[in-house]
Amino acid sequence: MNSFPGDTASTLVLRTLTKRYGSSLAVDNLDLTIEAGKLVSLLGPSGCGKTTTLRMVAGFERPDAGIIQIGATNVTALPPHQRQLGMVFQNYSLFPHRTVAENIGFGLKMQGLGRGARDERVKSMLDLIQLSGRGDTYPAKLSGGQQQRVALARSLVVNPKILLLDEPLSALDKSLRESMQFEIRAVQARLGITTLLVTHDQEEALSMADQVAVMKSGRILQLGTPSDIYDRPQSRFVAEFLGASNIFEGTTSGDGTALHIPGPQSSIAIPLATLQPTEKPLTLSIRPERIVPVAKGEGFLDGRVVGAVFRGNYAAYQIEIPALGREVFIYRQAESSLGELAYHLNQEITLGWKSEDAVVVTPE
C-alpha cells in the first residue's frame, strides 16, 4: 500500500477565507494551516461555518475572498476534480447496485486505470480496511461501520493529497462511533494523509484530531491540541462547548491575587494561579472533575449535596453553595463496581481545587 506524501506538498493552507450568503456572513476571514500528515478538526455548533469551510476546500463553494492552497498550488479557482482530494460524507454515498470492490475502484476506473492495476489497488484497500474477501458483497449486506470503511477506502484509493471528512460518523450508533474513531484515526496515521475533519461532536474531535479548531459565527475562536483546548480554554464559549464547566464571575482583589465572587450576603475570595489586573471583572472556568471534596476549613466552598446521578464509571453531583446562592457540579469516580455513590443527598461537603485548574476565560 502506497503511503501519502509527508512533506509540504500536502500541506493545506487557508488564508483570509470569507463566504457570504446574502447578508449572512458564513465564514469570516478564516486562517488555518494543516501541516502535512496531520488531522485537524473543525468543531462547532450548527451554523458556525465549519461545513461551508469544508465545501470551499472541496470546491463545491467558491469563496468571496481568500486563498485555498495545497502545497505550493493555489487551488481556489480549480474545480473539485482537479484538487486531488478525497472526501467521506456522513451518508456514505455508496452505489447500491455496485459491489464493494466496484465502489472502491470507481474513481480509478474514471481515471482510466487498467483492470489489473485497479484490482491490485482495490485489494490493498480491502486489506487496509479489514474487509478482505468482501469485494463481491453489495453495500446493503454490510453494517453501517463497514459501509463507512468502504466509503473511506473509495476516497483513499485515488491517492489524494488531502482527505476531507464531513461528519463521517454521525449516522452510526454510539458504540460503533467509538470503534470507528479508532479505525479511521489508525488508517489516517498509517497513511500519513493530511486530513480535515468537520464535526459537531466534541468527543469525536478530541479523540481523533491532532489539533482542534473551535468555530463560532464563522471564525476560529481557538486552535490547539485536544488537551490544550479542553484544559486551557480561552473563552467561556469554548469551555462550555467542550464539556461541562463551572463558571465563576467576579472582581479581582486589590492586589490581583484573588477573585471575589458576590453572594446573597457577602462575597467569597478564591485564590488565582497568576497575578491579574486589580479590581477588574474576571471569569473563571473549572471542570467538574477538577473540583474535589476536602476537609472542612481546607477548601473554598462549603455546600450540600442536592443531586446525584450515576453515570457508569463516575457519578455527577450537584452541590448547593448557600454563600453564593448557586450550585456547582463535580464528577467523582464510582466507589465500587456496584456503582455505589460516595456522597448522598443532603450530605454537607467542602470543595477545593488546585488554583491552576481555575482557568481565566473571556466572558463570551
Image (cartoon, helix red, strand yellow):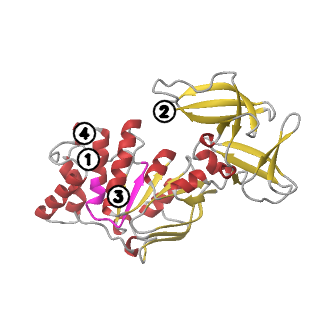
Left or right: 2, with 175 as reference point: left
**Along the line of sight, which residue is nearer the eye, 113 or 263?**
263
Amino acid type of the residue that numbered disc 2 sits on in the rendered structure: Asn
Which residue, given by chain and number where applicable, does mark 4 sit on?
Answer: 142
Numbered circles on residues, count: 4
Callout in the foreground (1, 2): 2
Which residue, given by chain and number where applicable, does mark 1 sit on?
Answer: 95
What SS does tag 1 mark? loop
Q: Earlier in the sequence, mark 1 or mark 2?
A: 1
Looking at the image, residue 28 lies above or below residue 141? below
Q: Earlier in the sequence, mark 2 or mark 3?
A: 3
Q: Earlier in the sequence, mark 3 or mark 1?
A: 1
Residue 107 in the image: x percent, y percent? Answer: 25, 59
Residue 198 on the magenta segment? no
**Along the line of sight, which residue is nearer the eye, 326 or 11?**
326
Q: CA distance from mark 2 to mark 4?
A: 32 Å
Callout in the foreground (2, 4): 2
Which residue, given by chain and number where applicable, does mark 2 sit on?
Answer: 313
Quarter of the image for residue 209 reads bottom left
The boundaries of the magenta stretch are 153-167
Amino acid type of the residue that numbered disc 1 sits on in the rendered structure: Phe
Which residue, given by chain and number where applicable, does mark 3 sit on?
Answer: 188
Could you classify mark 1 by the number of other residues whose Cα lies within 10 Å: few (under 14), some (14-19), or many (20 or more)? some
Q: CA distance from mark 3 to mark 1?
A: 24 Å
Whether the residues at callouts 2 and 3 have beta carbons within 8 Å, the answer is: no
Q: CA distance from mark 4 to mark 3?
A: 22 Å
Could you classify mark 4 by the number of other residues whose Cα lies within 10 Å: few (under 14), some (14-19), or many (20 or more)? some
Quarter of the image for residue 74 reads bottom left
What SS does tag 2 mark? loop
Left or right: 283, with 137 as reference point: right
- What residue is shown at x 88% (from left), y 55% (from top)? 254
Amino acid type of the residue that numbered disc 4 sits on in the rendered structure: Leu
